[in-house]
Amino acid sequence: MRPSLPRLQWRLLLREPAPRIGVLVLLLGLAYALVRGIAWTAMDAREATEAEAAAAASLAVKQQEVEDIEAGRVDAAQRPYAGSPLDYHVTATLPHRPLAALAAGQRDLSTSVAGITLWGRSDTVLARQPLENPEHLQVGRFDVAFVVVYLLPLLVIGLGFDLLGGERERGTLRLVLAQPVTLMRFLLAKLVVRFALIVGATLGFAALALAGLGLTAAAPLSVWLLVVWLYAGFWLALTFAVNARARGSAANAMTLASAWVALVLLLPAVINVGIEQLLPLPSRMELVGELRAAENRAQARAHDHPELAADDPFTWAQNFYRVQRDVERQTAPTLAAFEARLAMRRDVVHAASWLSPAVLVHDVLTDLAGSGVARHAEFAAQVQAFAADLHGQLAPRLFAASRLGAAEYDTLPRFTFVEEGRGRLAPPLLLLVTITAALLLWGCRRLRRADALSRETE
Amino acid sequence: MIGRVIAHELRTASRDGRVRGLLVLLLAVLAVAVLVGVVRSSTLRAEHTAASAIERANWLAQGTKNPHSAAHYGQFAFKPPSVLAVFDRGVDSYLGVAVWLEAHRRNSLIHRPADDAPVVQRFGELSAANVLQVLGPLLALLLTFATVAGERQRGTLRQLLAQGASPVTLLLGKLLAALLLLAPLLLASLFVPAVLAARAGNGLAPVGLLALAYGLYLGSFAALGVALSARARDPGAALVTALGLWIALVLVVPRLAADLSAWSAPTPSEHEFSVQVAREIKEGINGHDPRDRRTVALKAAVLAQYGVKTIEELPINFAGLALQAGEEYSDQVHDRHHARLHTIYREQADRALAFAALSPRLALQPLSAALCGTDLAAHQEFAAAAETHRRALVRLLNDDVTQHPGVAPFDYLAEPELWRRVAELRWEAAQRPAGRASPRHLAILAGFFAASMLLVLGAARRLRVDP
């Protein structure tokens, strides 16, 4: 009898049109988001390649200029700026990870291309902005992460809000319980069947994604599946617990919908407001004023030292460079304060995300896709560190008025993003497992008590 | 009769703890949202005033330098916050607040609040407009889903009709009662903005239009709720349908519409855009008019105009003229490409609006931001004003170079007196933001409301009395 209970429930589930339509809609949403994701990652990758190619071509031109002088084809006086250390530049790009197409994350907002030269300053090196339509930034992308975080719970709720209420209202529950089956087992069988449906649907999608993204995505996709199943499991456990309270199906739907609104819509907004109010950022507009005041002071200082001025092109470059470093030195404490505050806010958001499984899972999914806020912050840090190194290497050459040799262009540093070790996956998933288990246990105890009561009264 | 239906409905609602709880919760969320908006707005305004003062002081503190160096130093202009941003922040979070007005370049605005915002912001901001747009319809549907189906299930529907209420009166009464319950939401979220707008002397027309737009929006959902309640098998079915409708109309369709519009009218990449601008400035808009040849032509023309043979003989400084000519040429290029980008954005907005027949939020969202002066158009107005200012600033400084002929073009140093002659950008959001209300968006909302009312009337005509 017992093994056939899930099978029976499976058949019952598939007989209804609603679950079939729900799963179909979910799969359509996922497939659409996947196709779009593949399209925009391809566009992104093309932009990165083009930016890198353009930078390489312009460096090759500079190298050729020096080569011409070295070979005596051109007089050095004709190209006073050839080989200037100030003109060496590197284009840094943040590469895609295999699952990039599955979550847009911060990719549409933060830059993933940065131009690094000695001309630049630390406050402008990451100032490039994608041209994305701001209205689209506001609405957010229709990506796979959106479908999973927002819509998958709704399918789970739709499949599960009426586990008992309907049977009770139609009077079939009494028939079921007349069999040698406990209420808990009956409900758990229904739960398992629904979970199996979602596992099946997401496996189908994963196969599609594997075909679209290539085999490199296989390993991360299995982690992705695990996260999605845990998330679906959490919502199923919640519907189970709500069902165990033995209210009507309409009341269940209301409770579950409220939980969804609270966890997916309200809580993130509240966290956002809380952080903005409690950890306010200093004014960016006043930072602009500070930077410009520093520039005025630095220029006045340079002006006060006419002995530094001379007529060769290197002197102009040295003066310019000196002013920029002076500005950086003066404003470093303020910029560091901004960075510290932003890092603190990131930490608090990360901690607060534990309040809502939706935020938590969204975080994990964007991290898996490599478009999360942590990876973008890491990219920014690596770009700044690379720029600092480049300054350290080339500034002495600038002040020694020494041109770069043609062969040297090939040995100068190029930027490669180094993936940081990610050990942040386990704690959030453990939390999800714990909450899910707690909800299931609570529901089971409740049902067992109800079962005992009803059998006593029989 | 309809009065009795309304009174009955309101009495029932006031006894229902769930309805009371939801209303109070939503009102509290709205109050917090408005409060946060007010705090934020006043902080921004203070920052704006302070930054503008610092900027002016910096500009004046430049000391003696060549005017072209001053043009490279340039000015910064800061976008002032709009008064009604307390109600709707629109796309302001995703647009910069400061723009560097310097020689040769048309910069876009930097320091977008979203760059610094906690990452959870992408789930949605807490603004009164957002709460009304997202949770307002949910409340409207929750207030109405059981109105008819519940009475039918309890058997009181037959009783009511037996007392002489026509189905139309009954349904309209229930709808009006729901609207009366929803009215406090509008009041709670628009009262403070109205006071602020009146104090700022902007007139109340935009707030009135906001009330109308949001009234039509919430009214549509209340009417939909009543209609589906009248058609539903039982309250449970009505609730599930209502929730599904809410998710689809409020959350899914708008995102999908934005995505489809970006798909069909793609935004160029930043790299492609800046490369094209740089190339056209260097090689000419048609690709056959390189910068050095343009300078040679200008030189010949100027020499001919003054009837001299060499630049040294000119009574003016040729460098100033060349700078200004280069500036005007690159302005043309910038204008072309920015216009092209704006056309794409507009095209995307139009395509997204085509889906408004499916979701009224697609019409309400841009309309609300436009009325509050926080939409893309308002931003572009400021950016255009800043660009006009930049051009005047650079022209004035170039003219000063031109008027000072000398041995070497950039050895001439201007006195700080010159900086004082350059004004700062003064810009207040257009005085009649109500003028920006697009009748098209309002018409879509009215159409949606009318269609929902027709559904109610249709449901009344075929009202089933028994479960």
Image (tube, coloured by chain):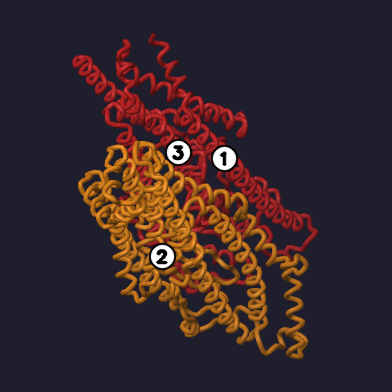
Please name the residue that numbered disc 3 is placed on: A151
- In terms of depth relative to the viewer, which is nearer, B69 or B27? B27
Image colour for chain A is red
For the point 51% across and 41% down, the residue is: A103
SS at mark 3 in the image: helix
The earlier-in-sequence mark between 3 and 1 is 1
User: Please, is residue A431 above or below residue A455 in the view?
Assistant: below
Mark 2 and mark 3 in contact? Answer it, CB < 8 Å.
Answer: no
Relative side of B286 to B13, left or right = right
User: Please, is residue B134 above or below residue A255 in the view?
Assistant: below
Q: Amino acid at mark 2?
A: Met
In space, the residues marked 2 and 3 are separated at their CA atoms by 39 Å
Residue A138 visible at all: yes
Give coordinates of residue B385: x percent, y percent: 51, 74
The earlier-in-sequence mark between 1 and 2 is 1
Mark 3 crowd level (few <14, some 14–19, many ≥20, 10 Å Cα): many
User: Please, is residue B88 above or below residue A376 in the view?
Assistant: below
The earlier-in-sequence mark between 2 and 3 is 3
Q: Which chain is orange?
A: B
Q: Amino acid at mark 1?
A: Tyr
SS at mark 1 in the image: helix
Q: Are marks 1 and 2 on the same chain?
A: yes
Please name the residue that numbered disc 2 is placed on: A285
Marks 2 and 3: which is nearer the front?
3
In space, the residues marked 3 and 1 are separated at their CA atoms by 14 Å
Extreme-top residue of the structure: A1
Give coordinates of residue A240: x percent, y percent: 33, 27
Q: Amino acid at mark 3?
A: Leu
